[in-house]
Each structure stands twice: as structure tokens, then as C-alpha cells.
Image: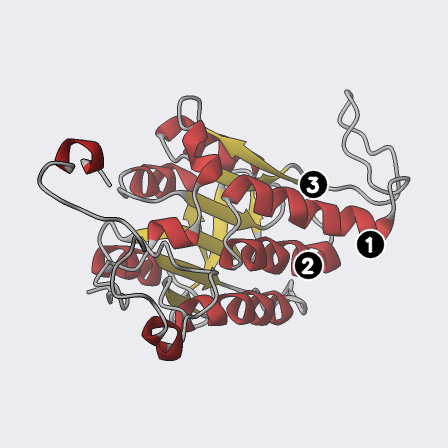
Amino acid sequence: MPAVNDHGNQKPVIFLAFANDRERYLYNLKLEQRGIREAFRFAEEAGLCEVVNENNTTIDDILDVFQKYRDHIAIFHYGGHADDYLLLLESDAGERAPAHSGGLVSFLSRQKNLQLVFINGCCSKPQALNLIKAGVPAVVGTSQPIDDAMATEISPRFYKGLVGGLAIDRAWREAVDQIRIDVGDEEFQALNRQGETTGSIVFSWDIYYRDGAEKVKEWNLPAAANNPLFGLPEISEEYYGKLPSTPFIGLQYSRKKRPLSFGL
């Protein structure tokens, strides 16, 4: 079962799943994985979440993890090959094992407390929109084949923002800003109306929100972990020793003045 933090509250679970392909090997996938794990390291140490990391992910791995941490997984991230209607996972023998989106969408839509699905693979927008339609509050997907270098940057930056206490929407916008800073506005092009690229570099990612679930934009790890003190400076025991014995210095209380001091 999921662990609890120092405040006795249930930690949200972050599920990271990665799968590669021998024939179309993604050399940057390990860099993305390392960057995301480093981003969440501080959050784990601060008791904000529990991270489950799966390499060479199989279909059984995904089902097993969700069933083990039943209704406690807040974020599901997939890194690897994808297309309009499947995720390319691996078999126990290391062969290709496609996970078709029909069953996957149905399965993920029933996971209570799942706030975000991030599909960091090519052409995953149709899956993202199907997940939104099925009830998942927020999904990141891609409109076409993606640039590997960008894929390695955008997801770690996004999760660094979440770990720093940013809400989902602001963390996403700041991750996009990093790409714009790196490549420049002239190269930061999206698809035109005909679906053709207007520049040599195309930014393919977008975040989609379910209608009526816009509140998820403000979801953040400290609030989910119910840790209101996250990010505040630590107060030493010496500080508490200097506090006065009464909170309101100079306040003279008597029964006659009780109506005046009520509520203090």
C-alpha cells in the first residue's frame, strides 16, 4: 500500500513507465528517465509523493502497478514509442507488445484520483483526446512525430516545476517557455491549418483539459500531500524559546471585558 508522509497523510503516487524498441531504439529515453527521476528525488525526500518507476514496461506491469496502488496514483507518465491508437510496450522476452488505446483508455478512465496522464511519444494526440473524453482531467499528448532532444527537456522541466510547488498549468507553461528560450521564437512553430509544418522545428506537445475539470490546472503536489508548510523556512527550537508566554502582550482579560475580547 502507498506510504504516508510525516503529517500522517497519504502520499500521491507518481507512476513512471518507459519502454523501448530494439529496431527503433530511442537513445535519449534514458536521459529523459534520469531527468524525471532527479526531478522527483527532492519531492520524495520531502515526503510529498511516492514514485514508482518501471523500465522495459509490459502491459502486465501497468495493470499490476495501478491495481497495487489502487486509486492513489495521481500522475501516469509514459515515455517511449506511441502513435494515434497505441503505446508500444515490451513483452517479457523484450519483444514489441502494443497496448491498444481502446482498452487502455477504458482502464485509465476508471482510476480515481488520477489527475494527469503524460504520453511522451509520437502522435499521441488522439489518445490524449480520447482520455479527456473518457474523464481523465488532464492529458499531455503530441500532434505528430516529436524531436528527441525536446522530449528529453520538456518532461523533466515540467516535473521540476511540480516538485517546486507549481500548479500543473503553470509548470507546463514554464516547460514550454524553456523550449522557446532554447530554440528561439522564429523556430518555435506549430502546425498550420493544412497540418503542414511552417518551420524546420515543430513543437508537437500540448496539454488538454477536460471540460468541467479546469480545477486540475491548480493541482499541485504540496496540496495533494496536505503539507501546508512545504516551501516555508524551517523554524529552530531556539526561536520557540524566545516566544512570550502569552500571545497578546499587554492584553488584560477579565470577566467584565469578556464580550470585548470574544473571538481573540
Mark closer to the chain start, 2 or 1: 2
Q: Nearer the observer, disc 1 or disc 3?
A: 1
The secondary element bearing badge 3 is classed as loop
Q: Looking at the rendered structure, which numbered label has been put on residue 204?
A: 3
Q: CA distance from mark 1 to mark 3?
A: 15 Å
In the rendered image, which quarter contains the N terminus? bottom left
Q: Nearer the observer, disc 3 or disc 2?
A: 2
Type of amino acid at the residue the image marks with label 1: Asp
136 in relation to 119, above or below: above
Q: Residue tagged by mark 2?
A: 153
Crowding around mark 1 (Cα neighbors within 10 Å: few <14, some 14 to 19, many 20+) is few
Count of picture labels: 3
In the rendered image, which quarter contains the C terminus? top left
- Residue 39 image offset from top left, x and y in percent: 54, 66
Q: Residue furthest right?
A: 186
- Residue 150 image offset from top left, x and y in percent: 72, 55
Q: CA distance from mark 2 to mark 1?
A: 10 Å
The secondary element bearing badge 1 is classed as helix
Q: Residue furthest left?
A: 255
Mark closer to the chain start, 1 or 3: 1
Type of amino acid at the residue the image marks with label 2: Glu
- Residue 148 image offset from top left, x and y in percent: 71, 58
The secondary element bearing badge 2 is classed as helix
In the displayed structure image, the side of residue 131 where residue 61 appears, left or right:
left
For the residues bearing labels 2 and 1, Cβ distance under 8 angstroms:
yes
Q: Residue at x 66, y 49 (%)?
A: 175
Crowding around mark 3 (Cα neighbors within 10 Å: few <14, some 14 to 19, many 20+) is many
Q: Quadrant of residue 80?
A: bottom right
42 in relation to 96, above or below: below
Q: Residue tagged by mark 1?
A: 182
